[in-house]
Image (cartoon, rainbow, N blue to C red):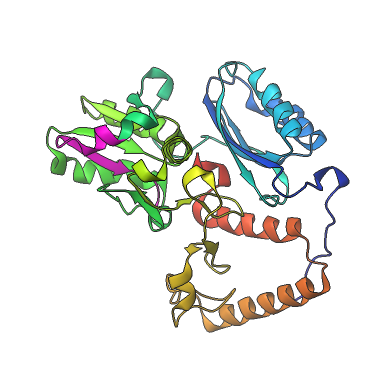
Amino acid sequence: MRLAPALALPARTAYHTGMIKVAALYQFTAFADPASLRAPLLATCEASGVRGTLLLAREGINGTIAGSPSGIAAVLAHIRALPGCAGLDWKESTAAEMPFGRMKVRLKREIVTMGEPEIDPRAGTGHYVAPGDWNALIRAPDVVVIDTRNDYEVSIGTFEGAIDPGTKSFRDFPQWWRDNAGRFGNKRVAMFCTGGIRCEKSTNFLLREGVSEVYHLKGGILKYLEDVPASESLWQGECFVFDQRVSVGHGLKEGQHGLCHACRRPIGAADRAHPDFEEGVACPACKDDYSETQRERFRERQRQMELAGDRGDLHLGQRLDRASDRREKRCGPASDQS
């Protein structure tokens, strides 16, 4: 299999280890013409040496970007100057290597896809709960805790006692709730997601469905892992993130998980030790998902990647671009994590 020529990273993205800042952000606001915002935003990102994915829609902006501290500051300043974005909030972490291969600014119908046209977080959401108050809430006997993320995210970490809806896409959440609402009686509902954006929509949805008391973790799992010490934490495992870091733990330190290069699901030490695991070809979760012809193609791709890596001419950007595009086909844009 012939690989595209290796792409050298521009000089401005030659970051020093430990100096890469990662910012996850979102803002629900009314953009009358999001298409007109795309080119200036992309130009600012490229001029600042920032990479990642940003989504623009009539309902606002969402995304995760990475770059130097000054580059991230420049892009955030640009976004805060957009209509309704002066109060933009974001979560920061760091990465040892650039976790994105290129910069993408995309126009979408929704900045996080739920598929419920009536949902509008600007009209009302659940009660925000600060990370420091979250433990007390979810330990209360009259509270049911629901993880609004997808099954492959939940598989590597979640809160103690949380319900896993087993959804493959956020689009599946409304139907899951309608099928299961009767299980929860009159209990209060507390929900959480990676960075907060999915809960903005899911709590608005539950309020519209008639749930009287709905809560969600302000800043999401990322803010909880940043603020709450491991010794006091009710979080179990690691938090999946949609970039080359794959997962983070307490203090937002990079986790121990990798990705299966076939299905793009997270894999840990147990997966790598499993008889069904083959580097770049299959993991226990996807062992039955591909034909032998496809597996042979994956083996050849892995072989070529290893050979190119030995030569030093397979650059990070090229590898990440392909990984990102395949992941988006299966589970949505990287910025859907927020």
Toward the viewer: 297 or 270? 270
Q: Position of residue 191 (x, y in %)?
A: 32, 37
Q: What residue appears at the point 36 percent right and 20 percent down from the top-left corner? A: 124
In this rendering, the count of numbered labels is: 0
Report the span colored magenta.
135-150
Residue 153 position in % (x across, y down): 43, 53
Residue 147 on the magenta segment: yes
238 vs 146: above or below: below
Residue 2 visible in the shown view: no
Query: Residue 197 in the image: x percent, y percent?
Result: 46, 34
Q: Residue at x 40, y 45 (%)?
A: 230
Q: Percent from the top left, x then y, of residue 247?
A: 51, 53
Q: Quadrant of the N terminus?
A: bottom right
Q: In this rendering, would 26 be left or right of 21?
A: left
The answer to whether residue 248 of the structure is visible from this angle is: yes
Residue at image x 78%, y 61%?
315
